[in-house]
Amino acid sequence: MSNSISNSNNTSAKNAGNAKTNILENIVGYSEGVERKRAREKTGSDFSQEKWKTSNDIAKLHPKRLQLKVAEVIQDTPSTKTFRLVSTGAILPPFQAGQYINLYVNINGVETARPYAISSCPTHRADPENGYYDLTVKLVDGGFVTNYLLHNVEVGQQFSATSPMGTFYHNPLFHGDKLVFLAGGSGGAPARAMIESVLNRGLKIDFHLIYGNSYENDVIFEDTFRELAEKHDNFHLTEVISRPTEGYSGRTGHLNAELITDVIGSVEGKTFYVCGPTPFNEFCEDQLTSLGVQGKHIRIECNGPPKTPSCLENWPSVVSEQDEVRVKVQGKGEFIAKVGEPLLNSLERNGYTVENACRSGECSLCRVKVIEGEVFNPPEARLRKSDETFGWTHSCVAFPTTDIEILY
Amino acid sequence: MSEFDAIVIGAGNGGLTAAAALQRGGAKTLLLERHNIPGGCATSFVRGEFEFEVALHQLSGLGTEDKPFIMRKVFNELGVMDKVEFVQEGELYRMIVVDEFDITLPASWSGIRNTLIENFPQEEEGVVGFMELCEQVTMESFMGLPQARKMNSEKMLNTNCKNYVKYGLRDAKSVLDEFFDDEQIKTLLAAYWCYLGMPPKDCNFCDLAVMLYAYGVFKPWHIKGGSQALSSALLESFLEAGGEVRFNCSVDAITTDQSGEKPKVTGVVTENGDSISCSQIISNASSVVTFGDLLDTPVLPSGISQDFKSRDLGTSAFCLYLGIDCTPEKLGIKNASTFISNTMDEELMHDTMSTMNPPVATMLTCYNVDDPSFAPPGKSQLSLLCLQYGSVWEDVPVEDYAETKYHFAEHLIEQAEQVFPGIRDHIEEVEVATPLTMMRYLNTPGGAIYGFQQNPEDGPLHRERYDQVSGLHLAGSWQGMGGFQPTYMVGVSTAKAVLKKVRQNKTTQESEAEVANV
């Protein structure tokens, strides 16, 4: 035996029932306890009927990985395709409309991933044969992954992904029942999921979508939104085009305070969802704030690492984004990285696999510890207080500003 | 030769303290954790401007600098005392039973006595006697009882542990009934049963007595930056000592050599298919997962099976984490811990835990009361928690899960708003954790947060430590009590036992090598 506590424990239990040697029987209630324990041994279960029950139960809601196959590719607009993904494994887990999955891809030998909002309604996931998630992907200029997805992916291709994640969804505990969604471009994807989820479930929610796009011929889900607005009294659609063709008769310009007020009237008692490119999100937030909307009523979907971190406050002035630094991964190797590239991306480019999901600083799956050197953490990095104390960072939005050594 | 002297599975409280103690004690240790962050329960998450404390309500066993208690020594030995800052709470708790009473117990043994006598003057004699008993039973259970057991001396037991002998293993309710007539004071003094998970009728008096005395004398504490700060500090200490950790790396199997009488640990297989050899494993996973799922023997070792059959899964919890856009004072919250109840019937409270009925008892914790840094200036974080068994949630169809959890969360807000109206209007962020969330992050059957149920016959006097697999040890709440202090301590004590084996092995190997050299 390893120590005195276990020794005496053993003595007591093995001698239970032998009144001469087990001193514990002197304790009021001890012998009754021994009896109760014996009785339970006769009737109880040893939990062995269902091996891995805990893991299997969790996997119904939150499997670590999904195995997906492209069942259909739909060209939505000149710049956008929807990939209808079915499971090649277990039934797809449920999600809250607005959430995303992180899709793993291998492009020319680089293992990376990108998060995409599920654009279909959660009710479409459950069918064991045909249940699906739609991912709607709009081409990003120079985008490594969107270019690959839009130009190379065909029906039948297989992917793995995380299960649905994220905090951008309607939370009935405090979002209320008057919702306004300000969407820009690809922001139409989570908007469709949220709108269809409200309408399909018959919720008593008033939903207004203000949808800003650059061009009339590039509006994702245009017909779907118009049909739904036609059919449902509690769904309202306002389309706005910022670069209209001559003769366009609809609303034009940006989603500014004036337009918002004109369309929805008072902002009182309403919750606003904002999803689009980062400049769009920042603009909308400013406009809503100028209208007196409190921060807690503005829910903004995170949208990747900052494109030009050197423009942000506290960026070390002596370092430029084009500079190169040495990244050493403890026990694994080292490589040269560009200061202006998020650490996670340069790790992946050099063959290192780091768990990740939101790639926007929020989910913390890509935590690494900086043992030596400095990284720049932008405001996107939702670090814990103790992360700063002990040098942990979220690699998806961290920029190495000196040679560094990391551990993960 | 094994790659590691020891492998620790799981970086919860028991795993972290075990790993730090092992590595600092000279054993080459590998720590494996399924999640991306250390801590298990002792963790936090960020939403908006808030970093939410997940699980620590009141840390016990620390004592003050003037009057230190065991956890200061433990944390010192683990090398984390200078890495974290502890914040003392001013009160044990405020308990409000709607339409019955509203009393706050201060974090002071004499203060508790005075408060009780002031509120229940007719019970003065009972108060004095009861508190004296709590103190004696606590002392005896820490001092006299282990000595008497070690010597196996009936005389020592009967002389040095007479209060324990008479009261220690009785159910808490019967002892309260013996000292008091007033139902209110009994309910007030039994409030901490929620830290054990079993109502006073079904828990050992000594467990309640120890908690009351320890919190009263050694005070309840928080950690600056939350329990995550301590988890991260323990990891740091482990790394500083040369330990190796892998996150996002769960264990699929514990492998054994089954040629002898007893299976003997040979290593683990990780989710990536890596086989790593070692002769000592400390598992911070639940006993059910460790032996039932991970261990590679074809059937459960018989002693384990017998123990499991006499066990029931303990409670899980439903918890709301609220980021509030005002100070606690504005809502009328004056204490870190407030127990809100609509009944004094603890058995009704416990029965409700097995249902989806609105909870009749809720624990509200506001860390900002004693530490404003727990939220941005002018704001605060609250948690609302009710104990609930996981089995009711396992039956909810997955497509109804989100709706069900919001619906249930409404009940907690409603119950808290009876006492602190206006909470809902101040919500800036909210996250809901159900027993299935506990199951997801803790990987415990039923989402149990305190391990197996703690009936009177489930305490350390009635249970053996598992030794059916040579080299496999458990550290966590599944072989003893749940909660922070017990799991931190069991990690250290298990590591100490393992260190002895590691040193023995090394000595044996060295002498064998010498023999070979000769």
Image (tube, helix red, strand yellow):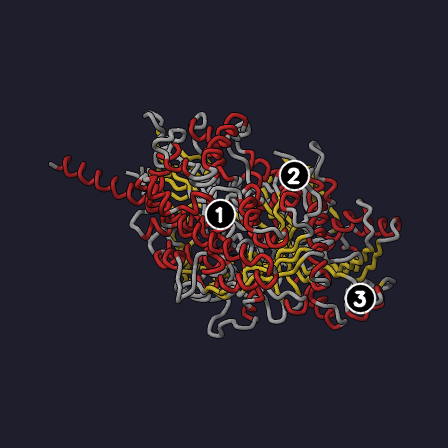
Query: Please, what secondary structure does the residue beneath circle 3 have?
Result: loop
Q: Which residue is mark 2?
A: B392
Q: Which residue is mark 3?
A: A268
Query: Please, what secondary structure does the residue beneath circle 2 have?
Result: helix
Q: CA distance from mark 1 to mark 2?
A: 27 Å
Mark 1 against mark 2, which lies toward the viewer? 1
Mark 1 surroundings within 10 Å by alpha-carbon count, few (fewer than 14), some (14 through 19), many (20 or more) = many
Q: CA distance from mark 3 to mark 1?
A: 52 Å
Q: Are marks 3 and 1 on the same chain?
A: no
Mark 2 against mark 3, which lies toward the viewer? 2
The residue lying at 72 percent from left, 58 percent from top is B418
Which amino acid type is shown beneath numbered disc 1? Answer: Asp
- Image position, residue B246 (x, y; %): 43, 48
- Chain ID of residue with mark 2: B
Which amino acid type is shown beneath numbered disc 3? Answer: Glu
Identify whether B15 is placed above or below A183: above
Front residue (pair B149, A47): B149
- Image position, residue B346 (x, y; %): 63, 46
- Chain ID of residue with mark 3: A
